[in-house]
Structure formats: structure tokens, C-alpha cells
Image (cartoon, grey):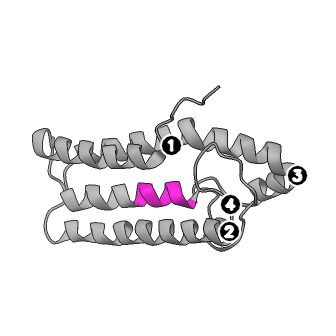
């Protein structure tokens, strides 16, 4: 039996960016962040990229998978994982926030919120259930100490 090919978070992430651009140009509703304030979007955008790179490097360093729904070999709790159980998803949301601020219109922010909810429902809850099954009490202790997002 073969597993059905699942759409992974990066696909949703890049689709979200495209949707944000479409909404910004076709249905901006209101431009509420103008120049030079829109340039502040560079901050969350850069932080999100850095957060993803650091989290990805931590997974590689510990030899565990970065792909959702694959069994983790190690529970990574150090580095950025001390502050967020899901720094990569949080990083993606920060990147989307940065892009939305750079655009300055209202509708791209709807995509940011939708993306965060989708990641939580479609990926994070399942991944955390798998981690609890695999790591038991260690996971539960970590879960009590570290928030899901920030």
C-alpha cells in the first residue's frame, strides 16, 4: 500500500504568498500602511527567515526529520525550541506578516490568519500527537514548559 501524497507546509506557504499578492492587487480593500512605515515589514520577514534556518539546522544537527507526519528520531528542545514548540511554522507566519506589512493593504492579512489556523489544524495537532506517542512523558513535560507558537 502506498501513502497518498500529502501537500506539505511549504506548498501552502508559497500558495499563501501568491494569494496575498493577488488580493493586494485585485482587492486591496484598504491601504492602511504607507511608505515609509511599510518598510517595517522587513523586520518580521527577516526574523521569520532566520528562525526557519535555525530550526532547520537544529533538526539536521540532531538527525531528525523536518517533514510533517514522518516519525521523529529525536525530540529537539534546545535553541529556538526553548521558546516555541513550532518555530518553523511561527517563522512562516512571521514571513507572511512581513510581506503583508510591506504590501500595506488589508486583505493580505486575512491570508496570514488563515495560514496560521490551517497549519495548526492540518499539521501541528497531528505532529504533536505523534510526538506524544513517541516520547511520552518527556514530550508532556516539554509541552507544559513551552508554548505552541510563542
| Gap between marks 3 and 2 measured at Cα | 17 Å
The residue depicted at 70 percent of the width and 71 percent of the height is 78
Label 4 sits on residue: 64
Residue at left 73%, top 40%? 129
Dot 3: what SS?
A: helix
Q: Which of marks 3 and 2 is nearer the N terminus?
A: 2
Q: Quadrant of the C terminus?
A: bottom right
Discs 1, 4 touching: Cβ within 8 Å: no
Residue density around tag 4, few if under 14, some if 14–19, many if 20 or more, within 10 Å = some
- For label 3, the crowd category at 10 Å Cα-Cα, with few meaning under 14, some 14 to 19 and many 20 or more, is few
Task: Tell me the quarter of the picture where residue 121 sits.
Answer: top right
**Which secondary structure dominates the residues rendered in magenta?**
helix
Q: How many badges with numbers are in the image? A: 4
Residue 113, placed above or below residue 92:
above
**92 within the magenta span:** yes
Residue beneath disc 3: 137
Amino acid at each position: 500500500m502506498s501513502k497518498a501524497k500529502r501537500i506539505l507546509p511549504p506548498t501552502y506557504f508559497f500558495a499563501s504568498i501568491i494569494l496575498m499578492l493577488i488580493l493586494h492587487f485585485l482587492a486591496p480593500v484598504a491601504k492602511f500602511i504607507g511608505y515609509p512605515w511599510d518598510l517595517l515589514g522587513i523586520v518580521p520577514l527577516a526574523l521569520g527567515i532566520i528562525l526557519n534556518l535555525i530550526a532547520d539546522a537544529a533538526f539536521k544537527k540532531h538527525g531528525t526529520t523536518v517533514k510533517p507526519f514522518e516519525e521523529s528520531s529525536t525530540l529537539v528542545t534546545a535553541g529556538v525550541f526553548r521558546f516555541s514548540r513550532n518555530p518553523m511554522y511561527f517563522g512562516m507566519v512571521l514571513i507572511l506578516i512581513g510581506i503583508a506589512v510591506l504590501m500595506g493593504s488589508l486583505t493580505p492579512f486575512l491570508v496570514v490568519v488563515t495560514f496560521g489556523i490551517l497549519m495548526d489544524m492540518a499539521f501541528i495537532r497531528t505532529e504533536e500527537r505523534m510526538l506524544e506517542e513517541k516520547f511520552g512523558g518527556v514530550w508532556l513535560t516539554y509541552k507544559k514548559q513551552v508554548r505552541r507558537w510563542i
